[in-house]
Structures are given as C-alpha cells and as structure tokens.
Image (cartoon, rainbow, N blue to C red):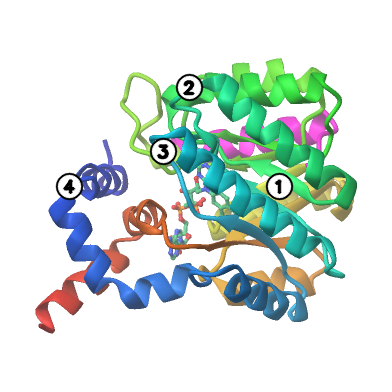
Amino acid sequence: MNLDLFYRQAVLSVAGNPKVEALIKTRARSLVRRYVAGETLEEALLVAERLEAQGVHAILDLLGEMVRSEEEARAFQKGILELIRAVAGRPWPKYVSLKLTQLGLDLSEALALELLREILKEAEPKGVFVRIDMEDSPRVEATLRIYKALREEGFSGVGVVLQSYLFRTEKDFWELLPYRPNLRLVKGAYREPKEVAFQDKRLIDAEFLHLGKLALKEGLYVAFATHDPRLIAEVKRYTGAMGIPKDRFEFQLLYGVRPEEQRRLAQEGYTVRAYVPYGTHWYPYLSRRIAERPENLFLVLRSLLGG
Ligand code: FAD
C-alpha cells in the first residue's frame, strides 16, 4: 500500500473514535468553515448565489448519513424536500445530492426506496436533478438496485455515482449502461479493504480515466468529479482530441477545494459544479476531507497545540 492510501485509511479508522470526534468537533472550526457552507439552508443558498455569480453551479447537499431510526430518515427527507422547494424558484440550474443511508438504507431498502421515490416525485416536475451519492462498498449493490428500480418506474432526473477504486466498478458500469445513466465518476472516499478495492493511487487514477473514456465512448453524459490536475488535464485533452463537445460532460469539485480552478474551468467554457454541503451533521463529511489531505490534519493539530 502506498503512503497516500495508508494515511487515508489511518485517518478514517480513527475518525469513528468518540474521543477523536469530540476533539475535532471543537477544534476544527476553520476547516468546517472552509468545506461546509453553513448550518442552515439560507447560508447554503447564499453560497450557491455567490458561486453562480462566478459561473459555477451548485450541487446542494443536506449533510446526513447512516441514520439509525425511521424517524431520523423521515426528518432528513423533510429537509431535502424543503431544499427542493427552496431551489425550485431560482433562476440557476437546480441540483441536489443525497445519500441513501440518510434515507434509512441501513434500516430497510424498501424505506430508502420509498423516501427517495417521494423526493423524485417532488423534484422532477420542478426540474431539480437528484444525484444519489455512492457510499462504502457494502452499500453499493443496494444503491444500484434502487437507482435501477426508479429508472424502471420512469424517473429520469436522477443520477448515480461510480467509484474507480472498486474492482467491481467496470462490471457495474456495463450493467448500468442499458439505463443510459447520467454518471458521476469519482475515485472513492471510503476506507476499503484490499479484497475489494485498488490500494495504489496510480491504478485508481488509471481506472478513473479508463471508465470515463468508456462512458464517453458509449455516449453517456459524464460528470468528472475530481480535483486532480492531471486527470482534469487528461479529460480536457481527450475530449478535445476526440471532438467530444463540452455539453457531453462536466467537471465537479467540492466547495472550498481549488476554487480558482473551478472559476478557470468555467471561464474556459466547461460546465462546472461545486458540491455545497450544509447542515449540522458535518462530522463524517469533514473526516473524509481530512483523510484526503494531510494538510487538513495539520490544521487540526495546530489548533490543539495552540491551546
Ligand atoms: P486526489 O488524488 O485525492 O487529490 C488530487 C489533488 O486534489 C490533491 O493533490 C489536492 O491538490 C487536491 N485535493 C483533493 N482533495 C482535497 C481536499 N479535501 N482539500 C483540498 N485539496 C484537495 N466519493 C464517493 O465515494 N462517493 C461520492 O458520491 C462522491 N461524490 C463526490 C462528489 C464531488 C463533486 C467530488 C468532487 C468528490 C466526490 N467524492 C465522492 C469524493 C472522491 O471520491 C474523492 O475522495 C475526492 O474527490 C478526492 O479525490 P480527487 O479525485 O480529488 O483526487
């Protein structure tokens, strides 16, 4: 395993420790401000307006995952419905992301399907696109099943995510292809064992490009969700060389990460979206950002040493 992956796995394995969680929650305020738009919907909408003014579209995400009761799942559903109603009247592209464990996937697949179906019934007529984030490997199968079930029911304003670090992904890709998915491609953000996932960054990157090119060749609309300058450059080079027009793909980055690159890509005429998370349940999201970037851990440690 290389150092990048070792670091990431180490951070994600201690992040679940309640003492570490309490420490980060009190000491990581500046990091939270960098990566999270705010605790309320109003704050998130303000951030979205600011991004829009720079030519970058927002993907609004009410933070939440791994709920443990139906009540909690329904409360998140209510929050997402409020978000959909709030963005519906805006003049910019309307786009939300959610997680199935936020809607009770771990309690019952039927519950998550039912709650998402109700969300799509509200979102589709309002022109709001709904992206189902992909979570860790034990949840991939059920997530794809729910996506396919909803497409078979006739919903179209819904998209799915594939992760290039998983061995299974190319097979999932071919099985999804008949559904003509609007695909978001990512490297993958979770701690995955060597039995199911590549552990070498070079292989994960190569697979990302392989899958992305395959999806473009098959005529799918692809959202390349990465901050990696090398991968972004290769997508630009490849699409230019193949004459693939800019309305067949887009770039997605996280709010707070490489904002100047987000603006530059938009100025170059690419569609760019920034993932804008908000809400009070920011801890798991923030721990994945710390795991991606050692500098973020140093910021937390520095604030600890600062007293
Ligand atoms: P890396 O190799 O991790 O990073 C490349 C470079 O980008 C770094 O050298 C650094 O300069 C910069 N960078 C990367 N991360 C950060 C950071 N946190 N802070 C500052 N700079 C950074 N993962 C999932 O598993 N499921 C999802 O549904 C999902 N959705 C996503 C949606 C969006 C819009 C984005 C951008 C990412 C999503 N991810 C998701 C996360 C993804 O899997 C990666 O963990 C994350 O994007 C980091 O990988 P990278 O491609 O940027 O490349």
- Residue 236 visible in the shown view: no
**Disc number placed over residue 17 in the picture, else none:** 4
Q: Nearer the viewer, residue 238 or 123?
A: 123
Residue 26, given in percent of the width and then of the height, sits at 23, 71
- C-alpha separation, residue under disc 3 versus residue under disc 1: 25 Å
Please, what secondary structure does the residue beneath circle 1 have? strand
Please, what secondary structure does the residue beneath circle 2 have? loop
Is 12 situated left or right of 97 in this image?
left
Q: Say which of marks 2 and 4 sits in front.
A: 4
Is 22 situated left or right of 132 in this image?
left
**Disc number placed over residue 33 in the picture, else none:** none
From this view, report whether residue 8 is shown above or below residue 148: below
Decide: marks 2, 4 in contact (CB < 8 A)? no
**Disc number placed over residue 66 in the picture, else none:** 3
**What is the three-letter code of the residue carrying label 4?**
Asn
Indicate yes or no: mark 2 CB to ligand 1 under 8 Å: no
Decide: marks 3, 2 in contact (CB < 8 A)? no
- C-alpha separation, residue under disc 3 versus residue under disc 2: 24 Å
Q: Say which of marks 4 and 1 sits in front.
A: 4
- C-alpha separation, residue under disc 3 versus residue under disc 4: 16 Å
From this view, report whether residue 298 is shown above or below residue 155: below
* Dominant SS in magenta: helix
Please, what secondary structure does the residue beneath circle 4 have? loop
> Which residue is identified by label 1?
223
Q: Say which of marks 3 and 2 sits in front.
A: 3
**What is the three-letter code of the residue carrying label 3?**
Met
Q: Quadrant of residue 160?
A: top right
